[in-house]
Amino acid sequence: MASLGIGGWVLTTWLRIKNGYPLDGAWGQAVYPKKNDEAMERIKLLSQENAQLRAELGSVKDRLANVERIVTDDSHRLSQEIDALRLTKN
């Protein structure tokens, strides 16, 4: 019975290592990954990239809202807005 428990533990640990999951110590603390300067720098770069992607997503949402407004707008009002833009340029 004890060998079955040990075998299950070994299998679970092997699957965690194989799939990249962090390992737990005897008291539940994370054994891997450990915090180091390289990991902190990577987290910092990923956070910056995340912020840039969120800003880009915001601008894409704004553009999509404008396109949706144009598509759902009636043609008469749209032509009036285009003519108004032409008049302001001249």
Image: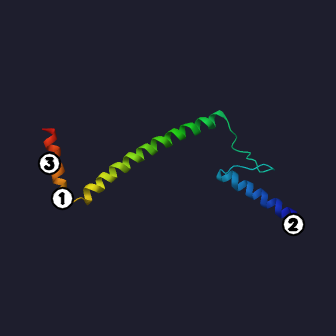
What is the secondary structure assignment of the residue under circle 2? loop
Q: Residues within 10 Å of mark 3 (few under 14, many from 20)?
A: few
Residue that carries the numbered disc 2 in the rendered image: 1
Q: Residues within 10 Å of mark 2 (few under 14, many from 20)?
A: few
Picture quarter containing residue 39? top right
Mark 2 or 1: in front is: 1
Give, as a three-letter code, the residue at label 3: Asp
| N-terminal-most mark, 2 or 1 | 2
Return the residue found at the far bottom.
1
Q: In the picture provided, is 87 more to the left or to the right than 39?
A: left
Residue kind at label 1, given as amino acid type: Ser
Mark carried by residue 10: none
Q: Which three-letter amino acid code belongs to the residue tagged 2? A: Met
Q: CA distance from mark 3 to mark 1?
A: 12 Å
Q: Determine crowd level at label 1: few under 14, some 14-19, many 20+ residues with C-alpha closer than 10 A.
A: few
Q: Secondary structure at mark 3?
A: helix
Q: Position of residue 34 (x, y in %)?
A: 70, 40
Q: Nearer the viewer, residue 11 or 49?
A: 49
Residue located at (33% from left, 49% from top): 63
